[in-house]
Amino acid sequence: MALIKSISGIRGTIGGKAGDGLTPVDVVKFAAAYGTWVLQTTNNNTIVIGRDARLSGDMVNKLVCATLQGLGIHVIDVGLSTTPTVEMVVPDKKAGGGIILTASHNPKQWNALKLLNQHGEFISDAEGKLVLEIAEKEAFEFAQVNDLGQYKQAEDALQKHIEAILNLPLVDVEAIAAKDFRVAIDCVNSSGGIAVPMLLEALGVTKIEKLFCEPDGNFAHNPEPLPENLREISKVIEKGKFDLGIVVDPDVDRLALVSEDGSMFGEEYTLVAVADYVLKNTVGNTVSNLSSTRALLDVTEKAGGNYYAAAVGEVNVVNMMKAQNAIIGGEGNGGIIYPELHYGRDALVGIALFLTHLAKSDMSMTRLRNSYPSYYISKNKIELTPDVDVDNVLVQMQHRYAKQPINTIDGVKIEFGKEWVHLRKSNTEPIIRIYAESDSNATAEHLANKIIADIKEIISEKA
């Protein structure tokens, strides 16, 4: 069993002893801490709750809602929904915050409480530390019987989310409908099985092959939308006459695409393609994290904008987007952040913008993908013994490559022309994660192996 407390929320496997797994005791304790923080910092006693379809969702939802009511907080429950939907409801309802009950791409035994501020955005590091402190000290006090919070449902939240997407100037429903796309979708038996077909039908897509769209929480495969987990939809598309495939994770904030021949469009290129379309219609800047492909930089500069790199993590990307007035941003895991709608990763708006782009480009998926610069990212890690000073290793790597452009806002990123390596330490174990990108997979692997060899040499010199 596992329980992970972090600044962004609490995540764990269901069951076990309190403090070891995500038990009802832990859910209540953390929900009470967050509710107390909202009351103390916003003077607002309304919180929005929503969840994905995982098996423990209903149980955790009931515990969280009841706990918040016990604090005197009014709960607006959007029920089975998506992360971006909850993010939009919070400011729409003028709530003090929101909790999304989802463990994102983690397997079905996991669940989590992800915490939003009053703007519908993930809470900051400092805010998360305050919530953790309240939980640790159990510094919460429950309301008297006459002051208990009220509970109500908001069943139209998803429909309003889709309507807001349809009203975006860059979403062209007529162009999409005119193409009469034939689409296969994989929603991994979670809430995307409700949201994605609803959106596609609203966009005029009538030919939809549904895979794993029953939102019962029994994930048909590993829910992370990586190529190795998407073999079923790839086979379906390869055998049928489909224009594309659409895949989302359990809480619908990541979007992966499959080309008409069954090949992967590439999760790194979801953001690149959507940004390309947005930049063709709006002059502006873009942001992604340090571990995302430089193809976004290429597309941005070609369009006359400026690209900026943020530390890994959605909250960091959002902060950089605001600071640089970016018109599109996100992460290379298929996360699209389009501020015209809201500041949060949103697979639904990504689908609408991408389909508009595909329709207007008059290209197939493979032709569109081939129109972008091709880069390959090699993802590796090196496991170290607990006695190794990881921070010192990263400092020594900076010294070793001092003549190269280096970014240290999140670990160490070293640039070699159009190639780069990003080194990040784990906060929970003695591991350095190593990401390397080049214009060929073999070169990216070679670059990563060279850096790994350097790290081992630095460690041996200290021994």
Image (cartoon, rainbow, N blue to C red):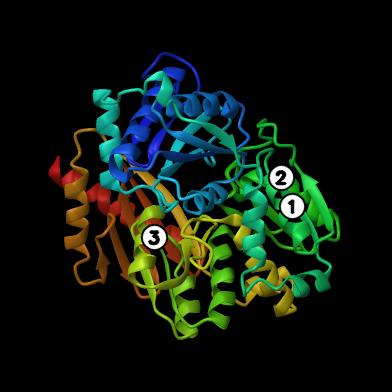
- Mark 2 lies on a secondary structure that is helix
Residue indicated by mark 1:
198
Q: Is residue 121 left or right of residue 355?
A: left
Residue indicated by mark 2:
194
Q: Residues within 10 Å of mark 2 (few under 14, many from 20)?
A: some
Q: Is residue 350 left or right of residue 114?
A: right
Q: CA distance from mark 1 to mark 2?
A: 6 Å
Single out the residue that lies furthest toward the front.
146
Write the residue at 17% across / 55% down. 396
- Mark 1 lies on a secondary structure that is helix
Q: Nearer the viewer, mark 2 or mark 3?
A: 2
Q: Are marks 2 and 3 in contact (CB under 8 Å)?
A: no
Q: Amino acid at mark 1?
A: Met
Write the residue at 44% across / 62% down. 292
Write the residue at 67% across / 41% down. 188
Q: Is residue 305 left or right of residue 349?
A: left
Residue indicated by mark 3:
317
Q: Nearer the viewer, mark 3 or mark 1?
A: 1
Write the residue at 50% across / 22% down. 14
Q: Amino acid at mark 3?
A: Val
Q: Nearer the viewer, residue 422 or 364?
A: 364
- In the displayed structure, 384 sits above or below 448; it is above
Give x and y (percent) for residue 268. 53, 61
In the rendered image, is residue 299 in sight? yes
In which quadrant is the N terminus drawn? top left
Single out the residue that lies furthest toward the top.
17
- Mark 3 lies on a secondary structure that is helix
Q: Are marks 3 and 1 in contact (CB under 8 Å)?
A: no
Q: Are marks 1 and 2 in contact (CB under 8 Å)?
A: yes
